[in-house]
Amino acid sequence: MSKLEKINGGVPHALEKALYRNQFILGPFFVDEYGSWEKTKIGKSVCLTTHPDLNVYQETHENKSITLIGYVLDPNDSDASDFDIIKSLTLEISDFDRLLDRSSKFGGRWILIVDDGKHIRLFHDAIGLRQVCYTDADYTSDLWCASQPGLIAERLKFGMDPRSIDFISSFKQRNSEYWWPGDSSPYREIRHLPPNHYLDLDTGSRCRYWPNRLIEKLPLEEVVEKTANTLQGLMISASNRYDLAVSLTAGWDTRVMLAASRKIRGKVSYMTVKQLGMVGNHADIMVPSLLASKFGLKHDIVEAPSAMSDKFRQAFDKNVPFAHEVWGRDAQAILDYNSLSKVGLSGSASEIGRCWYREKLYGRITPQLLSDVATGLDNDVFAMRSFEKWLAGLNDVFDYNIADLYLWEQRCGRWVAMSQLEFDIAWKDIFTPFNCRELLVNMLAVEEKYRKGPEYALHREVMSTLWPEVLSVPINPHRQKSTGVMLKSFLKNKLRRHTPDFIKRAIRGH
């Protein structure tokens, strides 16, 4: 057993590189236990230790610096590198509020640590997909941050909170894609930094910095144009840096991603995970296959195993506390598919522009209601206290709808962020084009009637602008009324025009 295997609890050598991929730990001194991890000093007091695959770039000038963890993209300049973008931000280093505003146009998956010579502050991308957990000053004297709470707990010898274990055990029985409410974690001493907040690394306190103004209502046509341009710009920027694999299903979010990929379709690949229990004629298999054939796209169907292998499970379960069994099977299939060579492209957070929770969250919003909607546990004390704390932090959110913010900061900021952290074991990195504050704010600025189903006019018009032909294949046909007749008729007509090889692949899912 190698030194790293001993540290990692006997994880097989072949998975050593995948374990803790793209993760970090930050504190008053460097962590030496992880062999090849990189070390970066920030100011005089902050020490950043990072997995060797996690990109870190630091721009310094005199006693000031900006440190990037992850990668950042400019939709208006597809050739701009991390160096170019961070260099431009150093011009605002003495005006933190202005720097925050400047960062709103950027996409990617990133953390910025800004040392202006007086304060050291940390904030992350719009949805917080480059996750940050940190120690609660009420319990610890030194501030530690990390990509997930287990790294801190192991270092400081924290035990799990029995209340959190009871909560997550109950939640897991109801939902295999469970998630942590509010800013909670399995440890009472460790908090999660929500989206739209920054963390003061000198004091350990956090502060909400957005929303910071009223929504400027915009006409549909203007929002469609801005959304389409931003999505396309981010797609081109990402494709200039990475080998992208665009996820396809039958749904709205991935269809927008397909439309936004039109200009780069010849240099990216498309893939669909055939999850456990999916038959070959499932819409999430058939529709992507039809789209790929129609537009001549390279499309791979990646079949998840019935169970994780013992070797992969060791790494996956150790990678984060309470890892999701249901995601582990898919992650193993994806790792086998791309061998950490591709950046996976996700349509997540598109739901923020689709009034996703409006039918469930209306009237007087209470911690009990939020708990019920999130977990199905309407009387769970742990969940209700977590949501009560989140609601108390919404003292002044101007005219932003709480249901939209809940979806943004809780569902996406917690559930999506955790899923991406777990899938870091399988991809080189993950790219979510909707993870851009300026884009999301623009989408929220349009009249709600254009964001609601079943038409979802905003999404449909964005697709029509980017690549109208993608709408020639039904979206989620299996969820519409008279689905059986409509889908069978559609597939029958389409399959007549394709080769036997395509029919075989679509039906069998190979």
Image: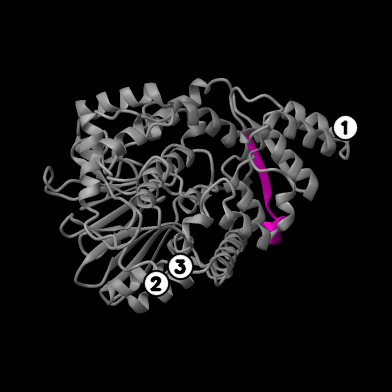
Disc 1: CA contacts within 10 A as few (<14), some (14-19) or many (>=20):
few
Question: How many marks overall?
Answer: 3
Q: Position of residue 251 (x, y in %)?
A: 61, 42
- Which quadrant holds residue 119? bottom left
- 10 Å crowding of disc 3: few (<14), some (14-19), many (20+): some
- Look at the image and say whether residue 205 sits in the magenta stretch: no
Q: Quadrant of residue 176?
A: top left
Do we see residue 342 in this rendering?
A: no
Residue in front for this viewpoint, 508 or 252: 252
x then y, percent, for residue 186: 26, 33
Residue at 25% over, 74% down: 63
Q: Quadrant of the C terminus?
A: top right
| 439 to the left or right of 111 | right
Tell me where the magenta segment starts and ends, as one range. Answer: 261-273
The tag on residue 9 is none
Quadrant where the image shows the N terminus: top left
How far separated are the C-alphas under marks 1 and 2? 52 Å
Q: Is residue 84 left or right of residue 193?
A: right
- Under circle 3, the secondary element is loop
Q: Amino acid at mark 2?
A: Arg
Q: Is the Cβ of the residue at disc 3 closer than 8 Å to that at disc 2? A: yes
Residue 316 placement: quadrant? top left
Q: The disc labelled 1 sits on which kind of residue?
A: Pro
Does residue 17 lie above or below 380 as drawn? below
Query: Which disc is residue 102 wearing?
Result: 2
| Residue occupied by mark 1 | 500
Q: Amino acid at mark 3?
A: Lys
Q: Residues within 10 Å of mark 2 (few under 14, many from 20)?
A: some
Q: Which residue is mark 3?
A: 105
Of pointers 1 and 2, the one earlier in the residue sequence: 2
Residue ID at (70%, 50%): 471
